């Protein structure tokens, strides 16, 4: 696995918008905002991995997905949606690790059979989106064993969902190319390597948690933000490493 300080997953939580000094809310119409190259959405997540809680910020435009831990972050992950390439920037090493999309013929060394059960959820999220969205809880069982839980909404976050799907597919392909089976990790491997889009089929996950110690929930979601171009640039003078 490559070193990734800022995002603990593939992956894909965050600071309040009142702390976002680097972006301004556009007052223009939705149609005009869509024409701006660096306009998009910002999502704030609380993320826990093996008991360690952190904040992750996702900035999503039609061309980019940026993940970091807040406005002052020097380390960040940048996914170029057009090139299908992930860049992991580590400031203290002055390095940029580049992961490009690649095909892999590796198949799982065990059967993968998913079963999905669902029920309505009353979960709500803080958002400036006026459209009502229906939330549903899903239990995803792998080979008849509980594996992953998702609370997803069925509308209103289509661009964010598309960006995360694209990112997870590129990351999964890279993990496949370096795959070594780990005993007892079938759930993790199925979710993150072999079927990385399975839990994203029902809508955008505003809350998700697993049997292997990972959980994340959406804290805040804001739309129609105009971001400075520098947030999507790679720093000059850094060493590039391709994997």
Image (tube, rainbow, N blue to C red):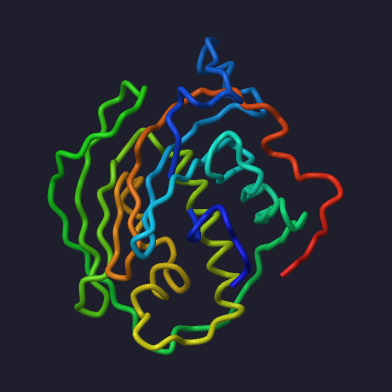
**Picture layout, residue 78 above or below residue 23:** below
Residue 28 image offset from top left, x and y in percent: 55, 11
Q: Is residue 150 left or right of residue 29?
A: left
- Looking at the rendered image, the quarter that the C terminus falls into is bottom right
- In depth, the one of 75 and 125 nearer the eye is 75
Image quadrant where residue 210 sits? bottom left
- Looking at the rendered image, the quarter that the N terminus falls into is bottom right
Q: Is residue 53 left or right of residue 164?
A: left
Q: Is residue 60 left or right of residue 48?
A: right
Residue at position x 21%, y 56% in the image: 138
Residue at position x 37%, y 80% in the image: 185
Residue 147 image offset from top left, x and y in percent: 26, 70
Residue farthest to the right, as pictured: 237
Image quadrant where residue 40 sits? top right
- In depth, the one of 125 and 84 nearer the eye is 125
**Picture layout, residue 184 above or below residue 28:** below
Residue at position x 62%, y 48% in the image: 76
**Picture layout, residue 209 above or below residue 108:** above
Residue 45 image offset from top left, x and y in percent: 40, 43
Residue 68 image offset from top left, x and y in percent: 56, 45
Residue at position x 44%, y 84% in the image: 108
């Amino acid at each position: 696995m490559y070193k990734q300080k800022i995002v603990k997953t593939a992956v894909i939580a965050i600071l309040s918008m009142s702390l976002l000094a680097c972006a301004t809310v556009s007052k223009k119409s939705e149609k005009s905002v869509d024409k701006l190259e660096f306009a998009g959405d910002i999502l704030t997540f609380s993320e826990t991995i093996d008991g360690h809680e952190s904040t992750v910020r996702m900035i999503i435009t039609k061309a980019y997905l940026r993940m970091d831990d807040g406005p002052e972050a020097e380390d960040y992950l940048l996914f170029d949606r057009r090139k299908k390439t992930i860049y992991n920037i580590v400031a203290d090493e002055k390095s940029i690790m580049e992961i490009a999309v690649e095909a892999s013929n590796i198949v799982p060394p065990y059967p993968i059979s998913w079963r999905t059960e669902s029920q309505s959820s009353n979960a709500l999220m803080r958002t400036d989106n006026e459209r009502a969205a229906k939330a549903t809880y899903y239990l995803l069982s792998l080979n008849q064993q509980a594996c992953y839980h998702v609370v997803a909404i069925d509308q209103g976050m289509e661009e964010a969902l598309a960006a995360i799907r694209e990112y997870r597919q590129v990351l999964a392909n890279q993990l496949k190319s370096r795959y070594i089976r780990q005993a007892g990790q079938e759930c993790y491997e199925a979710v993150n390597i072999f079927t990385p889009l399975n839990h994203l089929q029902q809508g955008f996950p505003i809350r998700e948690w697993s049997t292997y110690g990972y959980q994340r929930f959406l804290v805040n979601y804001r739309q129609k933000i105009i971001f400075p171009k520098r947030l999507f640039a790679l720093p000059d003078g850094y060493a590039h490493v391709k994997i």
